[in-house]
Amino acid sequence: MLNALTIDVEDYWSILYRDWLHVKDAIPSEAVVRNTRWFLQVLAEYNTKATFFILGEVAQCFPELIKEISRAGHEIAVHGFYHRQIFKLSRDEFKKETGDAKKLLEDLSGQEAIGHRAPAFSINKDTQWALEILAEEGFVYDSSISPMQGRRYGWPGFKKEIHRMPLTNGQSIIEVPMSTVSLGIKELGIGGGYMRHLPYFYTKWAIGHIQKKRPAIIYLHPYEIDTDIVLLKLDNFTGQGKIKAFKFHKSQMRNRQTVKGKVDKLLLDFKFSTIKSILRNF
Ligand SMILES: [Zn+2]
């Protein structure tokens, strides 16, 4: 079974500063380039292609990186422009951000970007209007729905298989839900923080379990391998957000030293490709 490896290309620092410390003009740092290049290298070693969901702001700051990813044969797809969750946007804002990111990524890569992933898997029952706009903007598929009740996201009970969703505007879109597994009453995701925090045997078991029935859809972030531990200096910030930001940062830094080794094992143990190539058999 061919599974899909997806990498959400975003810079940890710009998201931390903007979303958690409310710094308006936070821009992506060079770290996103360094960390994404590590993934390009390891994927080349294992002769594996992946889908890269990329933020418009990363493409704007580091256009060469987008060209490198595309030249290596990976799929270029859209992860929004400024990593703003859908529920923070109006329909018009979402349409503009997504359209701008799509055009920029296509101009830089020369590839048509047919796939979309919402920042923080923020398409759910309440924000499903976004799928209509995606279909109108020419996206073939969306991969933003996590069929579980997460702390910050999720659409519990959503169908786990890749399927075509009819939309109220008369169009349709293919939904490629994130893979989850049930552990008793709890539903867990695969990749990202789940891979970082849990021992590798969890990831191995979960993918082995899923790929008996359907391709596993796994997500990773370039920054999760970054062990340049920088202490967050909070002196310059005020307000309650400071404590929340500090807790978020602490949890995001935890177990990062384990991720490179886990990615290596993952690429050795399973076969991965892009979402686009999986959809060819759909
Ligand atoms: Zn993201």
Image: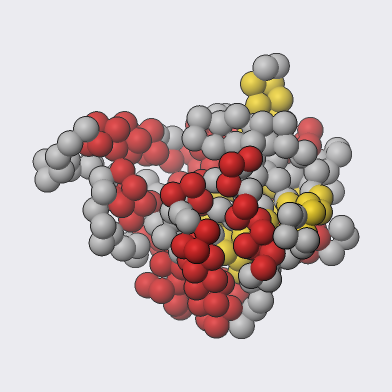
Placement of the C terminus among the 4 image quadrants: bottom right
Percent of width and height locating residue 18: 31, 52
Say which residue appears at 58% left-offset and 47% top-offset. 127
Say which residue appears at 44% left-offset and 35% top-offset. 255
Furthest-left residue in this view = 235
Say which residue appears at 74% left-offset and 44% top-offset. 216
Percent of width and height locating residue 117: 59, 55
Does 1 sit above or below residue 158?
below
Furthest-front residue in this view = 169
Camera sees residue 269 = no
Camera sees residue 217 = yes
The number of numbered discs placed on residues in the rendered structure image is: 0
Q: In the image, 234: left or right of 206?
A: left
Please identify the quarter of the rendering in which residue 107 is found: bottom right
Does 54 sit above or below residue 130?
below
Q: Nearer the viewer, residue 167 or 195?
A: 167
Please identify the quarter of the rendering in which residue 204 is found: top right
Q: In the image, 227: left or right of 217?
A: left
Furthest-top residue in this view = 184
Percent of width and height locating residue 147: 68, 36
